[in-house]
Amino acid sequence: MKDTALTKTHEALGAKMVPFAGYNMPVQYEGVNIEHETVRNGVGVFDVSHMGEFLITGPNALALIQKISTNDAAKLKDGKAQYSCMPNATGGIIDDLIIYRINEEKYLLVVNAANIQKDWNWITSQNDVGAILEDVSEEYSLLAIQGPKAAEAMQSLTEVDLVNLKYYTFSIEKFAGVDNVIISATGYTGSGGFEIYCKNEDVVHIWNKVMEAGADYGIKPIGLAARDTLRLEMGYCLYGNDIDETTSPIEAGLSWITKFTKHFSNREYLETQKKMGTTRKLVAFEMQERGIPRHGYDIVDIEGNPLGMVTSGTMSPSIKKGIGMGYVPTSYADVENTIYIQIRKNRVPAKIIKLPFYKK
């Protein structure tokens, strides 16, 4: 297991540490529900330094990015970020990622921790345009400062106007006295906030300054368990659960990041799928009776015939209901339809809903 530069800090705070994507990571501190509510109502900070970062530079950087990703990165301006995914040769998803345009010839790609080597191998194999690639994952740390009070709590640490930093934009400025920090108005919680990219040698100092600045706002460290409940309440896909090498972006409801105005890997297959429709779809559901849907539970019809499987599920701390996502045949995928979750010997009814589960 690899450590992040903050592992000792988490241990000193009493975090429960678990192996995650090859890293020793804090899963919780005080408890999932407390940490979840801290982010929904105030401000919390996550260490997500396990994520991967690739720099793609040179005159043909954009050409390579356009080839490997489904979204249209040509629409990015300096200081803008974009959610996208990388399709494989069979219509599945190699990974989902965020693309940051630093300038015309310099982009930062942020990928999932478990996929760093796989993604690197794929991108380098597709690089027939001479773009310059650098894996800087081991050099950078990443903090996610999330919640409705994040901007106010962190404003004393930077001259960047955090309140007016628009969603999916970023600035490279001084933060907590450290130069060249990427301050990004992105996150995975649906409650606003920022992500801070800095060098490993600076992250302990920045973490301490973030905790000091947020003290009057009730800031707390937040673990990966609450990160999961927060993202699920918003219906954000988790790679390895809701999307993977066998699920297409069309099936997964990611048509909005799949742009057929440009060429990308396996575009023809996905374009046909978009036109002809898919046999299954990723749906979101709320339990109609007591029961917590868990990853791997069967989704069945009223007679118990198999329809699919729960890809993500939990008891929602915000809405106090069992919620989940999973793939079902398209004929069952309409909003308001009833499906059933097989929880041990019981078939528990669930209603398909329109995302997000949590509405502010």
Image: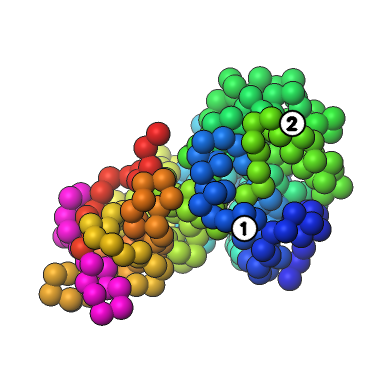
Identified at 75% across, 49% down, the residue is: 141
The correct choice, above or below, for 274 with respect to 307 in the image is above
Q: Is residue 77 visible?
A: no
Give the secondary structure at mark 2.
helix
Question: Which residue has dot 1 on it?
Answer: 28
Give the secondary structure at mark 1.
strand
Three-letter amino acid code at the position of disc 1? Gln
Asked whether 325 or 151 is in front, the reply is 151
Three-letter amino acid code at the position of disc 2? Ala
Question: Which residue has dot 2 on it?
Answer: 213
Which corner quadrant of the image does residue 270 belong to? bottom left
Which portion, as a residue range, is magenta?
A: 331-348
Q: Is residue 163 left or right of residue 47?
A: left
The correct choice, above or below, for 56 with respect to 94 in the image is above
Local crowd size for mark 1, using a 10 Å CA cut-off: few (<14), some (14–19), many (≥20): many
Identified at 30% across, 73% down, the residue is: 343
Q: Is residue 204 left or right of residue 314?
A: right
Which corner quadrant of the image does residue 358 belong to? top left
Total marks placed: 2
